[in-house]
Amino acid sequence: MTRGPTRRQIMIGAAAAATVAVVGPVAKAVAAPATGSADECGERYQGYRDADRDLPYARYMAQRTTPAPTAVADACAGPALAPDSIPGFDSITTDLAPTGYSTIETGYGRRADGVTFVAVRTVMPRVTAAMWDWWFGWHSTEAARYKLWHPDAHLYAALAEDRTALDIPDKAKYVGNTTFVDEYVGPKLQQLGIAFRDPIAHGFDVPADQTIVFGRVGSSIAPVDLGWLAHQVRPVEGGAEMRSRFFLNLRGLHVPDIEQAVCAVRRGASVDPTDLDLGVDLARDLLLHCGQEMNHLAGFLPELYAEFGS
């Protein structure tokens, strides 16, 4: 008996076909067998390798990710937010205003219109907004750097354009750039391309002592956008607070990065039909993931920035 294609094979083929449809004949490279070596693409891998221990920032490599703060763990263990209590994406610029707080600072849920929502507030002693602008321009050049953020779940990272050596402001190293990552969110492996946008151009008010990291979240294989993220960092007594927001199932299309799509397929594509519907289970997992990674990195970000930052 001849076996038919698996769901994953069907989705990979559909992603390749969609890419061809969006950008034309040049995208056929995605559908064709990739010819480059694994070294050209990089590899995804769990934990750290022996070679990683020779990197100059190796002393910041932890075996496990720091647990999420209590408020995040409690929200994760609790029920989803009532659908009618969740704000719409069009309120994000006022929600993440320079002052004040939202009625929801930590929680997860899904609106009646299908939009999946996550909010996380993380208190970060000794941290500043400038440190986070530096981090977002620095961390995606290699997997080992990305793993510093969440050693349990982060497997791979690359940039559309490596600007780390350019003599430009830290924010300019990631705004207008795209980071490609493989990571676990809960039990599911995700392959994502996050295109960072100028928050001021999108209506945010960002004082000089604050920052907002604003990005369009999409697939690194298919030309499909999945939603938006925003991380506001503003000063509080003793350090800073980060107020994170995710609005998912707000879909669109983008012109894919052919090289990165080919590499993502070579690493072993994780595209699955269920990834197209980002539901409440994913929201709960993302809440915990965000709470863990932000709390973990904040614990040593001041020292990392002092040693390697601008």
Image (cartoon, helix red, strand yellow):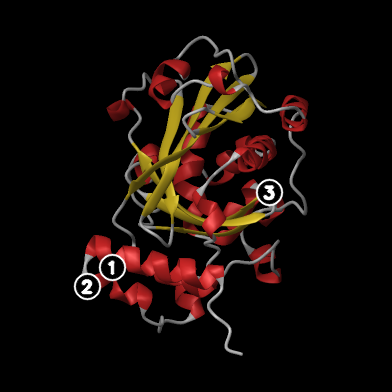
Q: CA–CA distance between discs 3 and 2?
A: 37 Å
Q: Residue at x 69, y 68 (%)?
A: 49
Which quadrant of the figure has residue 235?
Answer: top right
- In primary-sequence order, the first of circles 1 and 3 is 1
Query: Is disc 2 placed on a helix, strand or loop?
Result: helix
The residue under label 1 is 20
Q: Residue 27: x and y, percent?
A: 28, 70
Q: Please rate how many residues cluster around mark 1, counting C-alpha atoms within 10 Å: few if below 14, some from 14 to 19, many from 20.
A: many
Q: Which residue is mark 2?
A: 25
**Quadrant of the frame with the N terminus:** bottom right
At mark 1, the secondary structure is helix
Mark 3 element type: loop
Residue drawn at x 48%, y 70% is: 10
Q: Are marks 1 and 2 in contact (CB under 8 Å)?
A: yes
Mark 2 burial class by Cα count in 10 Å: few <14, some 14-19, many 20+: few
Disc 1 residue type?
Val
Upstream in sequence: badge 1 or badge 2: 1
* Place of residue 58 in the rendered image (x, y in percent of width and height, measured from the top left): 67, 56
Q: Where is residue 190, by image quadrant?
A: bottom right
Q: Nearer the viewer, residue 283 or 97?
A: 283
Depth check: give the residue in front, 143 or 100.
Answer: 100
Where is 221 relative to 72, above or below? below
Q: Is residue 282 left or right of residue 59?
A: left
Q: Residue at x 42, y 15 (%)?
A: 94
For the residue pair 301 and 76, the one nearer the viewer reads as 76
Which residue is identified by label 3? 186
Cβ atoms under marks 3 and 2 closer than 8 Å = no
Report the side of 149 relative to 93 (left or right). Answer: right
Q: Position of residue 252 (x, y in %)?
A: 34, 45
Residue 144, compared with residue 64, is above or below; it is below
Would residue 208 be visible to someone looking at this image? Answer: no
